[in-house]
Amino acid sequence: MNKLANELGTENIGKLLIKQAVPATIGILVMSLNMIVDTIFVGQWIGVLAIAAITVVLPIVFLISSIGMGIGIGGSSIISRALGANNTEKAFLTFGNQISLTVILALLFVILGTIFSVPILNLFGAKGLILPIASEYFSVVIYGVPFLAFAMMGNPTIRAEGKPKFAMYAMMIPAVLNVVLDVVFIKFFNWGMWGAGLATSISFASCGLYILYFFLSSKSELKIIPKNFKLNFKIVDEIIKLGGVSIVRQGAISILMIVLNYSLFTYGGEISISVFGIINRVMMFSLSPVLGVSQGFLPVAGFNIGAQNNARVKETIKKAIWFGSILGTIIFIGIVIFKEEIIWVFTNDATLLDETPNAMLIVFLVTPIVTMQLIGSAYFQAAGKAMPALFLTLLKQGIFLIPLAYILPKYYGIDGIWWSFPIADVLSTIITIWVLKREVDKNLK
């Protein structure tokens, strides 16, 4: 732990952020590729409706697995601050409780998801010709979700140890495996959507098993100690309060997907759901560097908050926003220049090629400023302040985007849905800047 303290507590902030953010970015990029590959292959080899089916199913999968992500982020915030305060006993206890919570809750929700699969798929927008294709995909993917939940729990915890490269490897393994299995199952075995689902499920399992291997090996400074599996109410309460931010955020995203799929189907039919499916995959992939900066920010900020080094915390906030804003600007320029070429990767359908580029440009319009939202909510998570973190997390998807995506298309048709994204981003960023500035002025003097 001394090496970790020397790095996070004394090393140059810019170098630290790069050291933490680059592996996180690569990991997120490759994990996003996991989702993109499914969309590309089913779009090219199965059809347009298959893209719509994946667009419906994946938010359900990530809603269930976000339990692990929430437990991981909440627990890693506690672990980072405990390590910063040199309290290894609390760090180990937190880690054991993370494992117990993830396994229990993930299995429970997978069982419920399996029993009520059709009503859930209907709720998320699997209507008309989309439902049978989505059901076939979901029936296989659901069995990989507990492994994904465990992986999402373990990934931020590994970063909290100061081991970002291993967190990156954990995200790269399933992406590479999914590419290979998609080709084998869809192209050569001709297993269709069932094959795509099987490839994804196996890739989820590989990710979870690698993370388990890491924690069982000598590489991890956090040890799996059976006595720490017993749930400690105080630790669980803190994990849930902080991790609940991520779970609620994913819940808001899931509600957003319900509203979006309803509006898309109402004003544009199945084809509009496919348009958004492509945009959503591009968004996941292209914003990976910005997300990587926010993920790299968490352990650095959390450790120095625990060590009560306010000057380093403020510097971390400023440099993270600066790095992310530059990356966001580069991403937007790339979208403007290559928007048509990007769509060609996913499909050769004439309607999609005609409708998607303009919609994608609108959705990405204010990408240069989104880092401010991410760092704002990440700071409060790192500081263990659940309520402001929850508020800032819900700003875009919950408070602004959901009502805008429902109301605007009533007046502006399908374009109203696309414009709801940049409007929500601008409003969320303004409020986040105000809240974060107040916090810095008040508590980081």
Image: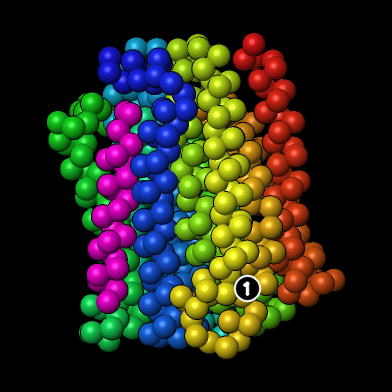
* 184 to 152, vertically: above or below: below
Instruction: Name the foreground residue: 152 vs 12.
Output: 12
Residue 353 in sight in this render: yes
Q: Main secondary structure of the magenta part?
A: helix
Quadrant into which the N terminus falls: top left
- In percent of width and height, residue 304 lies at 47, 18
Q: Residue at x 71, y 44 (%)?
A: 428
Q: Residue at x 41, y 83 (%)?
A: 44
* 125 to 112, vertically: above or below: below
Q: Quadrant of residue 114?
A: bottom left
- Range of magenta residues: 161-183
- Residue tagged by mark 1? 357
Which element is circle 1 on? Answer: helix
* 392 to 409, vertically: above or below: above
Residue type at the position of mark 1 = Pro
* 407 to 227, vertically: above or below: below
- In percent of width and height, residue 396 lies at 67, 48
| In this picture, residue 15 sits left or right of residue 190 | right
Instruction: Name the foreground residue: 317 vs 110.
Output: 317
Instruction: Name the foreground residue: 413 vs 113.
Output: 413
Q: From this viewpoint, which residue is outermost toward the right?
A: 411
Q: Residue at x 18, y 43 (%)?
A: 213
- In percent of width and height, residue 12 lies at 43, 21
| In this picture, residue 316 sits left or right of residue 30 | right
Q: Residue at x 42, y 58 (%)?
A: 32
